[in-house]
């Protein structure tokens, strides 16, 4: 519903831009300074209104994105997670400390495997036994949480 | 009065070999060859992804790594029922052929020649401290110069391998389904130019082999062993019959028979292993334990037998079975056969290059079955190489390897039959027991590779002195 | 948050193995550097590194042996055999020499799984030989992944009890991993030792000239990786990251230097890198191919 009003707003902006062309043409065909000033004022008002509409559209898109992101705190069961093992073009997901991370493009996870470990599993104990430093995980894209 | 001679290390070979010979008067009356390196590849391979075996088994040996890559690929293709097409088989055989060329040139010049030719004193190649160098000066010089050239030509052979396989040794490029390279006109031309250079050199090498034979003719009679030869076949899997080099077969007492790989057994009687079964068939999943304290055992090499007979494998075996060599079964025959084979293989590779079409490879995605069994048998640089793989739960359950050197450098079996090289040493006349140069010469002619032969795994216990005869 | 990191290879880009060797040989001729003794000890391995060394081109083997070092002992090349051969080993111990170890060191049962010689009736194990020579050598080079980190000789379950050279010697060891080690890496390091002493090493003891950057850093298929275009099986021309390529975690200069006369390297043979120079090869680098 709100996207509908977004495209209405964009239509309005397009009409304003078209009108601007007419105003500028009119300005060229007159030498009367009062008329020129009048058209300039119209142009300015249209431009400010258009900018306002554009800002509103941006804010709206941002809000939508945040909603989509928060809606995507997907919960994975261990069985669902095992599908994301990186084979045959599937994404490679790994769970550590209850959070599910996407390691599909992580350099040390070539072939969705990492020093003998395979993606699609809960690797909390292996991670804590080897790294123990959660900082490494902060750069990985998070795709959800492990169903408790 | 008998004397025991031990030579350890036998240098100028791949791995660690010890020869022990009991000499009475000047005649060797008893001999044993011991492989003294153990790493345990068969046990390491358990539980690994089957496709990894190709690269893994290559590391069994540095001078014949392509051979293991080939055998492993053939075993996996047998297990997965994958059949490469003719073009890929040609390219694969060219790759394999380069390994032959590299090995034979290096074996002849770097491993064998220093025992017959007084090379210039460039450490560590300085001549042996022996009185038995018979070549006149000008021939000595000729072969010394060719030694230097051999370094370049063998290097070139590996360059040809790398053009198709990425790097050498331990190449890539050979994989289930054929090859991974997309052959193009440039690669093919480069490979052809390298082959033609090496083919020219192989003529020089054959001449040098005949020169050595002329001045050391007694070596046609030294090192004679059982008249049992075996070959798994190589450069033979083509539609065109005239391309075939060596078909699988055995030759016993001068008669040729078809090869039946079910007649192959492995025997651990005189090797440092214990098991429920002393004799087993390759591919049988039977656990071995190492035991260095085992009485009478003297080597890490198991004793393979064909129908109970110790077989000889290698260039001489191939050329006798395919009828191209009509000579004898002595040390010099082995050396000459290897030189003849180098030239033959270069010729075959040239023909294969003409047959190769510029086509893309046929790689696919290979999924592992839950259970499978495959055998890869191929003759390679040193002789008959076999890989037996069984897959369970999509990983390797059991992997057996019988290398050519296991055949040639085998110890005695439970019947007391000497291994092939041991038999070759027994009966040799050693002119000077302080300088038993004959023994090393005889052993090296078999082109032993102990890195290959002693890959079995063992769990050791108390260390024990190796008993000298 | 961008960090300005200076490429560790900038100063090294000028020094190729060939240049280093020529420099070293010139210094030897001028008497400013000595042609030092060297021993290449093959132990628990496949001897692939000496074969790779024989494949050296710039400079080649004959050049190295005649001009750069005085290699007194090597199981594959030396003329002598038996006791006389091992005597050369013992004689070299009393001089100044560089020790190159090719292969891991088997320690099971006191090293009896790998006997390198018999001296006066007694077995000399690889472990003993490495200790004897390692303690007296001026420099110790661990050539190949087995010598540097254990490699395939120490692969699970490590039946021979193989260890890296550093684990059995109580001294500094220069590591030159690679399966096999590229001949240029060996020759270049030798030449550097002869002419300038120890090269700059990283935290694992590897010369930065050769091991400073990862394969991924200069891979010929990096463009495909960056654009997310991946091969689905072997034999294709795109990035093989999704198939298990270990380029991102392996430090060597294979993509630039290439192999065997600089003609090719595994990735351009359309197979992924298997990380053969990585410390955890092979167990940590498997599976090599995963579809």
Image (tube, coloured by chain):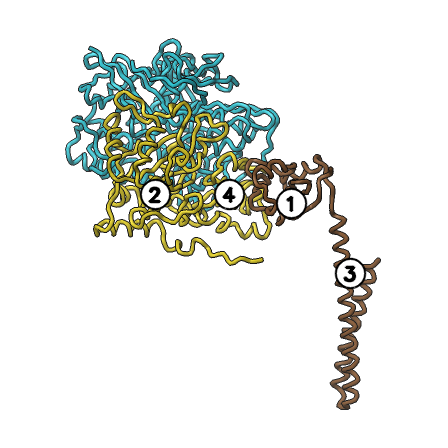
Q: Are marks 3 and 1 in contact (CB under 8 Å)?
A: no
- State the mark number for residue C270: 4
User: Does label 1 lie on the same chain as label 2?
Assistant: no
Q: Quadrant of the N terminus of chain C?
A: bottom right
Sequence-earlier tag: 2 or 4:
2
Which chain letter goes with mark 3? Answer: A
Of marks 2 and 1, the one in the foreground = 1
Q: Is residue B225 left or right of residue B62?
A: left
Same chain letter for marks 2 and 3: no
Q: Residue furthest bottom?
A: A32
- Which percent across, then down, holds residue A109? 57, 42
Q: Secondary structure at mark 3?
A: helix
The residue singled out by tag 3 in the image is: A60
Look at the image and tell me whether residue B149 can be seen.
yes
From the image, state the color of chain B: cyan
Give the residue furthest to the front. C170
Identify the secondary structure beneath mark 4: loop
Chain that the image shows in brown: A
Q: What mark, if any, has residue A102 been given in the picture?
A: 1
Say which chain is yellow.
C
Kindly indicate whether the residue at mark 4 contacts the one at mark 2 (C-beta within 8 angstroms).
no
Question: What residue sits 25% from the left and 51% below the top?
Answer: C27
Q: Which residue is mark 2?
A: C56
Where residue B271 appears, as percent x and y from the top left, is 40, 16
Measured along the vertical axis of the image, is residue B286 above or below residue A41? Answer: above
Residues tagged by mark 3 and mark 4 found on one chain of the structure = no
Q: Quadrant of the C terminus of chain C?
A: top right
Mark 4–mark 1 distance (CA, rounded to whole Å): 27 Å
């Amino acid at each position: 519903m709100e996207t509908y009003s977004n495209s209405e707003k964009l239509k309005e902006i397009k009409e304003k831009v078209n009108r601007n062309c007419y105003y500028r043409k009119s300005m060229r065909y007159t030498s009367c300074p009062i008329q020129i000033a009048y058209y300039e004022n119209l142009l300015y008002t249209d431009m400010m209104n258009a900018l306002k509409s554009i800002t509103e559209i941006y804010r709206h898109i941002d809000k939508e994105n945040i909603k989509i992101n928060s809606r995507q705190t997907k919960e994975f069961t261990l069985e669902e997670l095992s599908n994301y093992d990186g084979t045959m073009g599937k994404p490679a997901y790994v769970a550590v400390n209850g959070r599910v991370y996407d390691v599909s493009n992580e350099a040390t996870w070539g072939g969705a495997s990492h020093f003998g470990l395979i993606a699609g599993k809960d690797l909390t104990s292996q991670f804590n036994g080897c790294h123990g430093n959660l900082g490494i995980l902060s750069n990985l894209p998070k795709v959800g949480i492990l169903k408790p | 009065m008998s004397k025991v001679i031990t030579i350890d290390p036998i240098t100028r070979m791949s791995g660690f070999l010890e020869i022990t010979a009991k000499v009475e008067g000047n005649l060797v009356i008893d001999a044993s060859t011991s492989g003294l390196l153990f790493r345990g590849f068969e046990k390491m391979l358990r539980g690994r992804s089957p496709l990894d075996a190709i690269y893994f088994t290559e590391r069994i040996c540095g001078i014949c790594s392509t051979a293991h890559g080939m055998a492993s690929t053939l075993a996996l293709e047998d297990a997965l029922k994958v059949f490469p097409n003719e073009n890929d088989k040609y390219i694969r055989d060219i790759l394999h052929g380069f390994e032959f060329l590299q090995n034979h040139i290096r074996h002849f010049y770097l491993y064998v020649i220093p025992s017959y030719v007084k090379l210039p004193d460039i450490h560590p190649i300085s001549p042996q401290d022996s009185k038995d160098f018979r070549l006149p000066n000008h021939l000595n010089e000729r072969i010394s110069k060719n030694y230097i050239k051999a370094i370049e030509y063998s290097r070139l052979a590996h360059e040809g391998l790398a053009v198709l396989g990425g790097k050498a040794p331990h190449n890539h490029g050979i994989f289930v389904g054929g090859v991974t390279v997309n052959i193009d006109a440039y690669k093919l031309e480069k490979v052809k130019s390298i082959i033609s250079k090496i083919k020219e050199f192989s003529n020089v090498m054959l001449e040098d082999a005949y020169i050595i034979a002329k001045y050391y003719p007694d070596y046609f009679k030294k090192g004679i062993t059982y008249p049992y030869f075996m070959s798994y076949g190589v450069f033979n899997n083509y539609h065109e019959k005239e391309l075939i080099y060596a078909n699988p077969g055995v030759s016993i007492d001068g008669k040729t028979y078809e090869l039946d790989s079910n007649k192959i057994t492995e025997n651990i009687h005189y090797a440092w292993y214990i098991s429920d079964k002393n004799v087993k068939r390759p591919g049988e999943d039977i656990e071995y334990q190492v035991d260095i304290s085992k009485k009478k055992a003297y080597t890490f090499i198991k004793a393979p037998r064909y129908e109970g007979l110790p077989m000889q494998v290698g260039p001489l075996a191939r050329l006798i079975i395919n009828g191209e060599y009509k000579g004898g079964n002595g040390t010099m025959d082995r050396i000459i056969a290897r030189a003849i084979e180098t030239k033959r293989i270069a010729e075959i590779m040239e023909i294969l290059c003409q047959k190769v079409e510029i086509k893309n490879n046929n790689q696919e995605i290979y999924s592992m079955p839950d259970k499978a069994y495959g055998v890869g048998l191929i003759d390679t640089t040193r002789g008959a190489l076999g890989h037996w793989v069984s897959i369970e739960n999509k990983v390797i359950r059991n992997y057996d390897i019988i290398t050519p050197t296991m055949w040639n450098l085998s110890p005695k079996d439970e019947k007391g039959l000497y291994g092939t090289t041991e038999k070759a040493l027994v009966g040799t006349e050693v002119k000077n027991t302080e300088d038993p140069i004959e023994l090393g010469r005889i052993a090296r002619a078999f082109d032993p590779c102990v890195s290959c032969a002693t890959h079995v795994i063992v769990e050791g216990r108390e260390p024990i002195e190796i008993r000298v005869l | 948050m961008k960090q300005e990191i200076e490429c560790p290879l900038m100063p090294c880009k000028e020094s190729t193995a060939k240049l280093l060797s020529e420099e070293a040989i010139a210094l030897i001729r001028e008497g400013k550097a000595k042609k030092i003794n060297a021993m290449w000890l093959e132990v628990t391995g496949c001897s692939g590194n000496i074969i790779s060394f024989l494949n050296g081109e710039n400079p080649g083997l004959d050049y190295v042996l005649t001009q750069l070092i005085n290699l007194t002992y090597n199981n594959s090349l030396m003329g002598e055999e038996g006791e006389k051969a091992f005597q050369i080993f013992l004689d070299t111990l009393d001089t100044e020499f560089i020790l190159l170890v090719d292969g891991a060191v088997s320690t099971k049962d006191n090293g009896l799984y790998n006997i390198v010689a018999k001296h006066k009736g007694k077995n000399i194990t690889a472990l003993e030989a490495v200790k004897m020579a390692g303690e007296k050598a001026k420099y110790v080079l661990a050539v190949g992944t087995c010598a540097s980190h254990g490699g395939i000789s120490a692969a699970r379950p490590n039946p021979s009890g193989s260890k890296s050279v550093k684990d059995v010697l109580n001294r500094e060891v220069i590591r030159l991993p690679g399966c096999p080690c590229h001949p240029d890496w060996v020759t270049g390091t030798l030449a550097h030792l002869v002419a300038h002493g120890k090269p700059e090493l990283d935290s694992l003891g590897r010369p930065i000239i050769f091991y400073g950057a990862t394969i991924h850093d200069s891979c010929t298929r990096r463009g495909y990786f960056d654009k997310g275009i991946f091969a689905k099986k072997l034999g294709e021309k795109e990035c093989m990251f999704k198939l298990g390529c270990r380029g991102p975690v392996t430090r060597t200069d294979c993509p630039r230097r290439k192999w065997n006369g600089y003609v090719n390297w595994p990735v351009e043979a359309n197979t992924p890198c298997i990380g053969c120079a990585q410390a955890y090869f092979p167990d940590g680098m498997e599976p090599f191919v995963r579809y």
